[in-house]
């Protein structure tokens, strides 16, 4: 699992550097991706890249993996800390989430976002 966590650390570091080609290269051409910013889903590497470009033009998200777990169905759950700031650097949100990945041929074919309960719930 440590090797897989390192794989995801590299993936998220590329995302945080805004290196979309490096991240997209780890996805299937028909990847199914959540639009966690506006809702809905996008399909395909090109659409995911366009979604990120639009997002990065308006907000500055950073995502840091904390742990990785293999689920019985074969999906990988990555617990993450997500910090979203304005382009001016103002903190907009800080949350912990689960990113759930499904793989095909060692490439990401689908990702889901699971909200975690807060202490107030």
Image: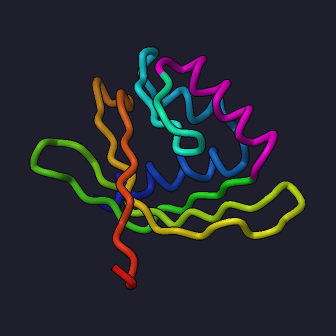
Q: What's the coloring here?
A: rainbow
- Between 28 and 59, the residue placed more toward the observer is 59
Residue for point 41% across, 26% down: 32
The answer to whether 37 appears left or right of 68 in the picture is right
- Between 35 and 80, the residue placed more toward the observer is 35
The percent coordinates of residue 56 (x first, y second) are 75, 42
Residue for point 80% across, 58% down: 86
> Residue pushed farthest front?
121
Q: Quadrant of residue 46?
A: top right
The percent coordinates of residue 82 (x first, y second) are 56, 63
- Quadrant of the image for the N terminus? bottom left
Q: Is residue 12 magenta?
A: no
Residue for point 12% across, 42% down: 73
Is 4 rendered above or below residue 81?
above
Residue for point 42% across, 62% down: 97
Q: Is residue 53 magenta?
A: yes
Is 37 rendered above or below residue 64?
above
Magenta-colored segment: predominant secondary structure:
helix
The percent coordinates of residue 57 (x first, y second) are 81, 39
Range of magenta residues = 43-59
- Quadrant of the image for the C terminus? bottom left
The percent coordinates of residue 5 (x first, y second) are 39, 58
The answer to whether 59 appears left or right of 88 in the picture is left
The answer to whether 14 appears left or right of 3 in the picture is right
Is 87 rendered above or below residue 110?
below
């Amino acid at each position: 699992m440590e090797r897989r966590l390192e794989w995801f650390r590299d993936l998220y570091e590329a995302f945080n550097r805004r290196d979309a080609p490096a991240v997209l290269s780890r996805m299937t051409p028909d990847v199914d991706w959540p639009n966690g910013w506006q809702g809905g889903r996008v399909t395909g590497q090109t659409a995911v890249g366009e979604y990120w470009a639009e997002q990065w033009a308006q907000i500055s998200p950073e995502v840091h993996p904390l742990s990785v777990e293999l689920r019985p169905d074969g999906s990988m759950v990555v617990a993450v800390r997500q910090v979203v700031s304005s382009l001016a650097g103002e903190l907009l949100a800080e949350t912990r989430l689960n990113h759930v990945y499904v793989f095909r041929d060692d490439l990401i074919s689908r990702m889901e976002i699971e909200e975690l309960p807060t202490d107030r719930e």
